Image (cartoon, helix red, strand yellow):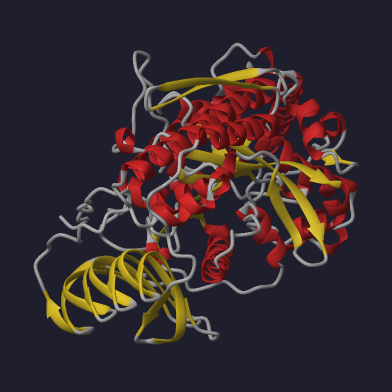
């Protein structure tokens, strides 16, 4: 699936529609585990053993130091290999549009095991977020068996790709997931939707951050798998509205490159065997996502930090000059924050990959590789057939080229070399714990020693230019807020503080953000309504007398339902009316004709409406051939 792809030296490969991406938005934010708080370590290690992927860990292994060390190595190696993926994406995308978001793993009685971002990268609007990690099976004695491992020249990546739910409404924005994480990622996506809807209904900013999907998976413990609609890699995006299921396999990196990794001068073996191909697949996904829908609500949330009144008016999509000038200033400052965070990401890359951490990490990988080669040598002496299978350990899906026979034979059990000793002792030098609450300072000292250097960003709006200089992001944000307040002009347009939105199928009064008349939604805007059982309706477009009327897009969720149903086209009295495009989980997108909400049958593909997510008419792409 993720075969390595060549990178042209003369120019970046820009994803389709990257040219229409708002300047305030990133294209990809890479989330990964970077450290763990001391209070969370015991629960993390026990959950890691209980939720082993690819096999079962004997209870006798749960409390052993080697299991804890492997659990720690997942964090250390994820931090290291995330830099390879970051570099591969940076080579293909416009400057400053790829951000890193390292996470710290935490535990408390309310949320259990969870993670939160250390930096502010996820507060910037983005088209895609990519959860990334490198997995190792908890029992080191099973390294050469079937369970996926990360040791020496063997790696097992985990990934989840998502966008804003409006970019893929029926799937809550979930686009791709490694097979073991699908249910956890689906639950977490649903939980995010519930939090966002509750905040919108109450008219307050959303609180709480989404954990890494791998950490959410560990925290689930005994929860059952869900019937998530999935499709195999490589199936055309239009064929089925389903999550692309990313197979789990061992990847064998190029032995020659791994052998030379300690010197730091050879090509990164992870880039050659996985990251370059993964970056190419991310670009393909970017080309399949409607950038406007993916960033619209994140832009509104970012604006709310500067100016709540402007954030309310944003849904009106007003062409008034006073609104446009104020919006341009605010978005220019959000873009400046993105540029500052991009510079911080570069500092993290330099500290993690080329700094002391990277030097130690490469020593570990080289030592592991030598130990693994010795084990293979001994196995070769014991059983030639088994030794050949060991040398062929890899998965064909991600770019390695092994036969099915060789892959099947690789499950043979080996003995003769202990994996304890110098390698795991060396790994102690990369302990990812934090003994104090000073998380940012600890992370900066460990991973990015040049992180707090003074940086400057030039921002432009209308005919103005301003250079903002700061030593850290908190200082930078304070300066952008001060600048905004000193330059902002009054608006001639106001958004209603409280306006009613309704839907015939959901009892109660919802909230409308947009044009309002006599306390009811009338004109353009965004509305949401829900009931205590969990059913909800969201709508973007035109309204009249408090309900959807005209061109728009609507997401309908039933209580306890899997995913949601998405309608885009015409509406009357709150219900689909006329030519409407419909998406449901597990089904192909389809065009139907409605009359007062009643499905009248199939119709020919047409326009999805000109309701527009960015203040300009938008005819969304029809995904059917």
Left or right: 117 with respect to 182? right
**Quadrant including the N terminus:** top left
Give the residue drawn at x 34%, y 17%: 11
Residue 273 horizontal/vertical position (percent): 49, 31
Left or right: 615 with respect to 451? left
Left or right: 29 with respect to 63? left
- Above or below, comparing residue 274 to residue 208 in the picture: above
**Quadrant including the C terminus:** bottom left
Q: Front-most of 295 and 233?
A: 295
Q: Front-most of 243 and 262?
A: 243
Can I make out residue 34 in this image?
yes
Residue 194 horizontal/vertical position (percent): 55, 70
Left or right: 250 with respect to 368? left
Q: Count up the numbered dots.
A: 0
Which residue extends farthest left?
Answer: 604
Residue 213 horizontal/vertical position (percent): 61, 55
Residue 33 horizontal/vertical position (percent): 68, 43
Give the residue drawn at x 12%, y 63%: 605
Q: Front-most of 510 and 420?
A: 510
Kindly indicate the quadrant of the structure image that contains residue 5: top left
- Above or below, comparing residue 468 to residue 541 in the picture: above
Can I make out residue 274 in this image?
no
Kindly indicate the quadrant of the structure image that contains residue 478: top right
Q: Front-most of 26 and 36?
A: 26
Give the residue drawn at x 80%, y 57%: 107
């Amino acid at each position: 699936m993720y075969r390595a792809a060549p990178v042209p030296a003369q120019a970046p490969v820009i994803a389709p529609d990257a040219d229409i991406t708002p300047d305030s938005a990133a294209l990809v934010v890479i989330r990964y585990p970077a450290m763990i708080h001391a209070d969370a370590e015991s629960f993390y290690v026990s959950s890691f053993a209980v939720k082993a992927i690819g096999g079962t860990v004997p209870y006798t292994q749960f409390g052993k130091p080697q299991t804890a060390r492997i659990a720690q190595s997942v964090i250390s190696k994820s931090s290291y290999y995330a830099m390879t993926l970051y570099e591969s994406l940076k080579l293909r995308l416009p400057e400053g549009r790829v951000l890193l978001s390292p996470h710290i793993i935490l535990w408390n009685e309310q949320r259990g095991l969870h993670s939160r971002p250390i930096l502010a990268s996820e507060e910037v609007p983005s088209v895609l977020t990519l959860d990334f990690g490198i997995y190792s099976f908890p029992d080191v004695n099973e390294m050469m068996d079937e369970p996926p491992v990360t040791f020496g020249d063997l790696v097992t990546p985990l990934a989840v790709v998502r966008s804003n739910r409006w970019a893929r409404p029926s799937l809550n924005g979930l686009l791709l997931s490694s097979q073991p994480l699908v249910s956890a990622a689906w639950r977490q996506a649903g939980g995010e939707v519930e939090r966002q809807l509750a905040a919108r209904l109450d008219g307050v900013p959303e609180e709480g951050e989404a954990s890494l999907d791998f950490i959410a998976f560990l925290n689930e413990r005994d929860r059952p798998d869900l019937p998530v609609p999935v499709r195999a890699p490589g199936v055309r995006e239009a064929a089925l509205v389903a999550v692309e299921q990313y197979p789990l396999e061992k990847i064998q990196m190029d032995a020659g490159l791994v052998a030379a990794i300690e010197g730091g001068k050879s090509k990164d073996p992870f880039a050659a065997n996985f990251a370059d191909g993964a970056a190419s697949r991310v670009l393909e996904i970017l080309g399949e996502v409607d950038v406007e829908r993916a960033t619209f609500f994140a832009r509104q949330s970012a604006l709310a930090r500067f100016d709540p009144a402007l954030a309310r008016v944003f849904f009106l999509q007003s062409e008034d000059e006073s609104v446009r000038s104020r919006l341009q200033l605010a978005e220019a400052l959000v873009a400046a924050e993105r540029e500052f965070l991009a510079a911080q990401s570069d500092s993290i890359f330099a500290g993690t990959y080329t700094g002391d951490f990277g030097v130690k990490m490469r020593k570990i990988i080289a030592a592991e590789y030598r130990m693994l080669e010795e084990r293979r040598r001994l196995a070769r002496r014991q059983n030639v057939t088994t030794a050949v299978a060991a040398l062929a350990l890899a998965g064909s899906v991600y770019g390695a080229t092994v036969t099915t026979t060789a892959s099947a034979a690789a499950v043979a059990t080996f003995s003769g070399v202990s994996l304890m000793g110098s390698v795991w002792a060396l790994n102690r030098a990369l302990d990812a714990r934090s003994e104090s609450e000073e998380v940012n300072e600890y992370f900066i000292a460990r991973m990015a020693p040049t992180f707090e250097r003074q940086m400057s960003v030039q921002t432009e709006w209308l005919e103005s230019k301003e250079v903002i200089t700061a030593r850290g992001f908190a200082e930078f944000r304070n300066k952008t807020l001060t600048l905004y307040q000193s330059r902002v002009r009054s608006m001639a347009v106001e958004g209603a503080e409280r306006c009613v939105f309704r839907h015939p199928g959901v009892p109660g009064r919802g909230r409308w953000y947009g044009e309002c008349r006599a306390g009811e939604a009338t004109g353009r805007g965004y509305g949401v309504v829900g009931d205590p059982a969990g059913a909800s309706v969201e709508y973007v477009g035109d309204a009249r007398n408090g309900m959807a009327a005209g061109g728009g897009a609507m997401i309908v969720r039933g209580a306890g339902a899997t995913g949601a149903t998405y309608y885009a086209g015409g509406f009357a009295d709150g219900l689909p009316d006329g030519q409407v495009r419909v998406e449901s989980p597990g089904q192909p997108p389809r065009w139907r004709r409605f009359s007062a909400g009643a499905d009248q049958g199939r119709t020919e593909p047409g326009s999805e409406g000109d309701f527009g997510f960015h203040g300009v008419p938008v005819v969304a792409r029809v995904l059917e051939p």
